[in-house]
Image (cartoon, rainbow, N blue to C red):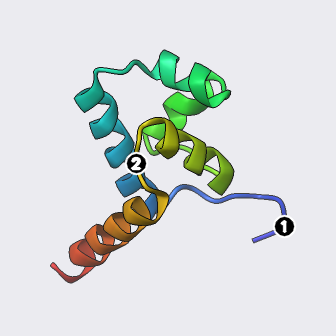
Amino acid sequence: MPRGTKGAPGPLSYEIAATIRGELARQKMSKTHLAQEVGISLPQLSKIVAGLKRVDIEDLEAILTTLGLNLRQVLSNAEAATQSRRLG
């Protein structure tokens, strides 16, 4: 893959997106509010939350911190879920 290009999001991105969606619902927080708090555009956040866009680590950390989630824990859980799907 050429430098500077990103492929389609993979299974790990989908798992992370599902975690973000779940936490947004749990907290009854709108994507608009989260985007404003994080400092990214609503369309960009919407694509991340839908699992349609890869997210860079700085934006992911800001999103998760705003939601009160731990980056390492979310990544670990997402990887475990991804591996479980591959094996099951």
Q: Looking at the image, which residue is at 50% across and 43% down?
A: 65
Name the residue furthest bottom. 87
Q: Nearer the viewer, residue 69 or 44?
A: 69
Q: Which part of the image, by quadrant, shows the C terminus?
A: bottom left
For residue 15, side relative to residue 26 (left or right): right
Residue 63, position in %: x, y? 53, 40
> What is the three-letter code of the residue carrying label 1?
Arg
Residue 40, above or below 57: above
Task: Evaluate whether residue 66 shows in this view.
Answer: yes
Residue 71, above or below 61: below
Residue 22, position in %: x, y? 27, 38
Q: Quadrant of residue 59?
A: top right
Q: Earlier in the sequence, mark 1 or mark 2?
A: 1
Residue 74, position in %: x, y? 39, 59
Q: Looking at the image, which residue is at 33% across and 47% down?
A: 19
Work out how far the residue at label 1 is from the one at label 2, CA to CA, in angstroms. 31 Å
Task: Evaluate whether residue 42 shows in this view.
Answer: no
Q: Residues within 10 Å of mark 2 (few under 14, many from 20)?
A: some
Q: Nearer the viewer, residue 26 or 56?
A: 26
User: On the image, numbered disc 1 is attached to which residue?
Assistant: 3
Name the residue furthest left. 88
Secondary structure at badge 2 equals: loop
> What is the three-letter code of the residue carrying label 2?
Leu
User: On the image, numbered disc 2 is attached to which residue?
Assistant: 69
Residue 74, above or below 50: below
